[in-house]
């Protein structure tokens, strides 16, 4: 996600303070308020987020967000079972679909990622949350304090690649961690900062307990 120019937190016409990137565009505002940074544990939703973060590589997130309904239609609601059954004919068809991002590598990666997800011996939810970092002691004050990668996102990227996933680089995986609420990078002063802290802490504790069992 592109770092916004200052001010990093702005107050909208509704009187609510938000991270600047989520304050202007209505679709961004909804995504910022309702999804980004909110802990997510539905494996199908997580598969969708993983794939869309891969499609976002090299593009702005708003481009992906506005096309998300078309992506969902193209990829059967991101049901891994149905996506895994897609063929080369489907790839060629989607390369002609202007409603999505027509990138052969990313389309093929979505299909192969579905197959990799189905081959897991744990749920995608359990796998991803197993890489959750300890909660931040304090929220970031500006986007200069928000990293592009972390040791956890690098480790997750390496692990997913070993399992056959594609378009899962460390930067993409940190964006996924933000999107799925594994980390809370809402800035201090934003009304969403710390809003999902209890759920995130519970998930991190559960993951730690599972890994030590």
Image: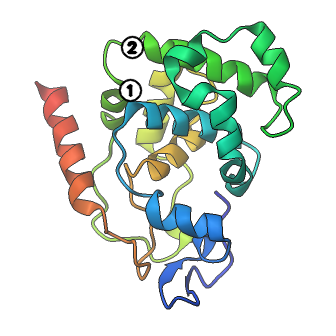
Residue 140 pos. (x, y %):
43, 71
- Residue 54: image quadrant is top right
Identify whether 35 is placed above or below 48. below
- Taking the image as shown, residue 151 lies to the left or right of residue 53, namely left
Q: Is residue 63 left or right of residue 110?
A: right
Mark 2 surroundings: few (<14), some (14-19) or many (≥20) residues within 10 A: few
Residue 89 vertical position relative to residue 177 in the rendered view, above or below? above
Quadrant of the image containing the N terminus: bottom right
Residue sitting at x 70%, y 57%: 62
Which label is found at residue 164?
Answer: none
User: Mark 2: which secondary structure?
Assistant: loop
Residue 3 vs residue 62, the one in the foreground: 62
> Which quarter of the figure has residue 210?
top left
Q: Is residue 137 above or below residue 48?
A: below
Q: Position of residue 133 (x, y in %)?
A: 32, 46
- Is 75 positioned to the left or the right of 95 in the image? left
Residue 80, x across and y down, in percent: 51, 20
Residue at numbered disc 1: 124
Q: Nearer the viewer, residue 158 or 173?
A: 173
- Residue 163 in sight: no
Report the residue at 39% width, 52% height from top: 181
User: What mark, if any, has residue 120 been given in the picture?
Assistant: 2
Cα separation, mark 2 vs mark 1, equals 7 Å
Q: Is residue 113 above or below residue 3?
A: above
**Residue 99 shows in this picture:** yes
Question: How many labels sit on residues?
Answer: 2
Q: Secondary structure at mark 1?
A: helix
**In percent of the image, x 30 and y 62: which residue is there?**
196
Horizontal side of residue 74 vs 82, given as left or right: right
Q: Image point 44% across, 13% down: which residue?
A: 118
The answer to which quarter of the image holds residue 92 is top right
Foreground pick, 48 / 137: 48
């Amino acid at each position: 996600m592109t770092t916004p120019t200052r001010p990093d937190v702005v107050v909208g016409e509704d009187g609510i303070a938000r991270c600047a990137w989520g304050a202007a565009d209505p679709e961004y505002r909804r995504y910022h308020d309702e999804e980004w940074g909110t802990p997510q544990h539905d494996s199908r939703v997580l598969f969708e987020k993983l794939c869309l973060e891969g499609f976002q590589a090299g593009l702005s997130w708003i481009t992906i967000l506005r096309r998300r309904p078309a992506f969902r239609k193209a990829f059967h609601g991101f049901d891994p079972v149905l996506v895994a059954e897609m063929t080369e004919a489907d790839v060629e068809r989607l390369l002609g679909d202007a409603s999505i991002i027509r990138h052969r590598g990313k389309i093929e990666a979505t299909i192969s990622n579905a197959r990799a997800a189905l081959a897991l011996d744990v749920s995608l939810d359990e796998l991803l949350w197993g890489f959750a970092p300890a909660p931040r002691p304090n929220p970031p004050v500006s986007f200069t304090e928000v990293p592009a990668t972390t040791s956890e996102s690098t480790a997750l990227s390496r692990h997913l690649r070993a399992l056959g996933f594609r378009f899962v680089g460390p930067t993409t995986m940190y964006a996924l961690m933000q999107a799925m609420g594994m980390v809370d990078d809402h800035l201090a002063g934003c009304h969403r900062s710390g809003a999902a802290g209890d759920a995130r802490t519970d998930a991190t504790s559960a993951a730690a307990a599972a890994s030590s069992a």
